[in-house]
Amino acid sequence: MPYPPGRPLEERRRACAERRARRAAGRRAPGRRGRHAVREPYVTALIQALQRPHKRIWQAVISVLGVCALLSVCGLSSYFIVADERQGRGARASSVAAPTAVPRDISSRTSDPEPLTVAEVFPGDAIIVDPAQPPYRVLRTQASRDCRAAASGRIGRLLRDLGCSQVVRGTLRSPAGGYLITAGVLNLAELEGAEWAHERIAPLVDGGLGRFEGLVAGPHTAAIALSSARVGWHVRGHYLVYCVIARADRKPIRNGDAHAERILTDLLERHLHSTVLERRTTS
């Protein structure tokens, strides 16, 4: 309320100071609290009351999720167990079926006594190694119990001493006609003897102490027996396979001749070793 206008300034200042002092003393009086102090317990209780239902809800949600996860794990485990059992039943059923081929031991003539035949080694008048390429023409075949017909000198004696019982060989002409080839299979007593022959032949050939003989197959094929030749040999089981290559024009075969290398791969590796003798390993 405004002060009377005639009141001195000093008195009005004292009156304002007293009123301020009384208001300050009233706020500090014992038993009185501020507005926030009065509300704090009720607010805390209210927050706690609101939090308790939420806590129970989250506990329920977590419990439901845990149950779902447990059920999922159990379901997947059951599925895999059933799948494994089905596969096991299928494997047992398939194992009962008869095999399409029975392995045959060709490490010795005792386990593989059946002699070779010309039809087995040269099944027709042409040898097709690659269907995309022209065949090799078979000019003549021969089966003999005397392995020295296929090799002369000390190589022939070596084969005899190792128990060679037969040789099946044939003379062929290359697809382009520029090469003559005699290829054959020697039937030794056992694997150890075939491997020993494989090691001993190289120094005998290099030293001019023996050679594999070409088989003349009629007119214009004398070069296979009379000309210098490229020779290769290989072992599988108790068999020794070999190949003699000569140029039809009787010229020597140069080192690195691509055609001669291709012939060795086709007839020695792919036909005799990997086809004819591969069939011998199954019955």
Image (spheres, grey):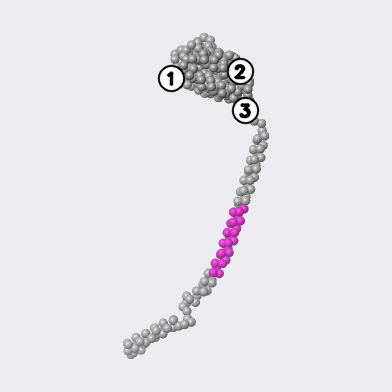
Q: Is residue 49 above or below residue 193?
A: below
- The dot on residue 103 is 3
Question: As drawn, is 255 to the left or to the right of 161?
Answer: left
Residue pointed to by mark 2? 117
Report how far apart the C-alphas of labels 1 and 3 lie in the structure: 40 Å
Residue 239 x, y percent position in the rendering: 57, 21
Report how far apart the C-alphas of labels 1 and 2 lie in the structure: 34 Å
Residue pointed to by mark 1? 255
Furthest residue in direction left, as rendered: 9
Report how far apart the C-alphas of labels 2 and 3 lie in the structure: 20 Å
Furthest residue in direction front, as rendered: 161
Residue 83 location, quadrant: top right
Of labels 1 and 3, earlier in sequence is: 3
- In the image, 81 versus 26, the foreground residue is 81
- In the image, 220 versus 14, the foreground residue is 220
- Residue drawn at x 56%, y 67% is 52
Residue 279 x, y percent position in the rendering: 60, 24
Magenta residue check for 60: yes
> For the residue labelled by badge 3, is the local secondary structure a helix, a strand or a loop?
loop
Residue 126 location, quadrant: top right
- Residue drawn at x 62%, y 46% is 80
Residue 246 x, y percent position in the rendering: 48, 15
Which quarter shows the C terminus? top right
> For the residue labelled by badge 1, is the local secondary structure a helix, a strand or a loop?
loop
Look at label 3 and name its amino acid. Answer: Pro
Q: Residues within 10 Å of mark 2 (few under 14, many from 20)?
A: some
Residues in magenta? 48-71
Look at label 1 and name its amino acid. Answer: Asn
Asked whether the viewer can see residue 172, the reply is no
Residue 66 x, y percent position in the rendering: 59, 56
- Residue drawn at x 45%, y 83% is 29
